[in-house]
Amino acid sequence: MSCNVGNADRVLRILAGLAILALGAFGPLRWWGLVGLVPLATGVMRFCPAYTLLNIRT
């Protein structure tokens, strides 16, 4: 599995993931906060399956 997420993209994904998790933790729809795990995981692993399908590397 090769890295296809660049440094700037990685930082934005991690920050967005943490923000969505925080909103889910303190908001009325708590289970929606789990959506934040997707950008967080792709930022930490530096691999995005959608980028592979679209042949994108950042």
Image: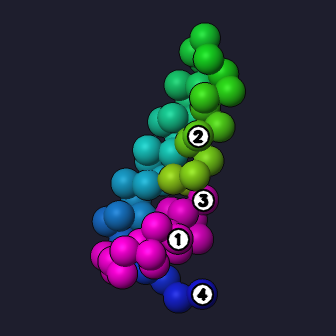
Q: What's the residue type where badge 1 is placed?
A: Pro
Q: Main secondary structure of the magenta part?
A: helix
Residue 56 rendering spot, x and y as whole percentages: 33, 77
Nearest-to-viewer mark from 1 and 2: 1
55 vs 37: above or below: below
For this view, does 5 lie left or right of residue 33?
A: left
Q: Residue furthest right?
A: 31
Q: What's the residue type where badge 3 is placed?
A: Ala
- Secondary structure under badge 4? loop
Q: Residues within 10 Å of mark 4 (few under 14, many from 20)?
A: few
- Between disc 3 and disc 4, whose residue precedes? 4
- Secondary structure under badge 2? helix
- Between disc 1 and disc 2, whose residue precedes? 2
Q: Give residue 4's quadrant in the image.
A: bottom left
Start-end of magenta stretch: 41-58
* Picture residue at 68% right of the left edge, 27% below the top: 31
Where does label 2 land, which residue? 35
Q: Is residue 20 visible?
A: yes
Quarter of the image for the C terminus: give it. Answer: bottom left
- Between disc 1 and disc 3, whose residue precedes? 3
* Picture residue at 53% right of the left edge, 88% below the top: 2
Q: Nearer the viewer, residue 31 or 7?
A: 31
Q: Is residue 5 visible?
A: no
Label 1 and label 4: CA atoms lie apart by 10 Å
Where does label 1 land, which residue? 49
* Picture residue at 51% right of the left edge, 35% below the top: 20
Where does label 4 land, which residue? 1
Where does label 3 land, which residue? 41
Residue 14 rendering spot, x and y as whole percentages: 48, 53
